[in-house]
Image (cartoon, grey):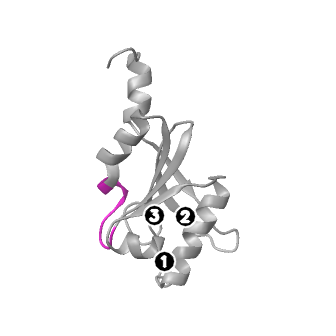
Amino acid sequence: MGDLTAAEHSWLTTPHERWVQPSPADAMRLHVLEWPGAGRPFVLLHGLASNATTWSAVARELAARGHRVLAVDQRGHGRSDKPDSGYGFDAVVADLAGLLDTLEVDAPVVAGQSWGGNVVL
């Protein structure tokens, strides 16, 4: 753990869970794993049929370097809500934009794996 206390090490390696409603017009909530940090934020999006934990190792490394990291369970995945409809790119892109606004994330690096990469583009 180096110069970190046990509590500081735990804070960096254990994400905090949040549920975020990206649009006030829609009750759908996204589950987000958040690692704190004061550096440039990173937002990580998983691929189809996956979840935010796909990014755990990467997120821990980024957090250890001082970055705020958000790994998102996209709608219908992981612990996020699973609505009956709304799975087109327009909806998931709006989810991402609303999430960034709601959590006041400025100028993030956004990365996506597979389907998540398409959402980022």
Give the Cα distance between marks 2 and 1: 10 Å
Residue type (three-letter) at the residue carrying disc 3: Ser
Mark 1 falls on what kind of element?
loop
Residue that carries the numbered disc 3 in the rendered image: 80
The kind of residue tagged 1 is Pro
Marks 3 and 2: in contact by CB < 8 Å? yes
What is the number of the mark on residue 42?
Answer: none
Q: Which mark is residue 83?
A: 1
Identify residue type, mark 2: Arg
- Name the image quarter holding the N terminus: top left
Dot 2: element: loop
- Sequence-first disc among 2 and 1: 2
Q: Is residue 52 above or below residue 1?
A: below
Q: CA distance from mark 1 to mark 3?
A: 9 Å
Q: Which residue is mark 2?
A: 29
| Residue at 30%, 56% in the rendered image | 54
**Relative image position of residue 49 (x, y in whole percent):** 30, 71
Q: Is residue 21 visible?
A: no
Magenta segment includes 84: no
**Residue at the far right in the pictured view:** 24
Q: Residue 4, percent across and down?
A: 40, 18
Q: Which residues are magenta?
A: 47-54
Residue name at image x 60 percent, y 67 percent:
97
Q: What percent of the width, then of the height, locates residue 53?
A: 32, 53
Label 3 residue SS: loop
Helix, strand or loop for the magenta stretch, by majority: loop
- Crowd class of label 2 (few under 14; some 14 to 19; many from 20; radius 10 Å): many
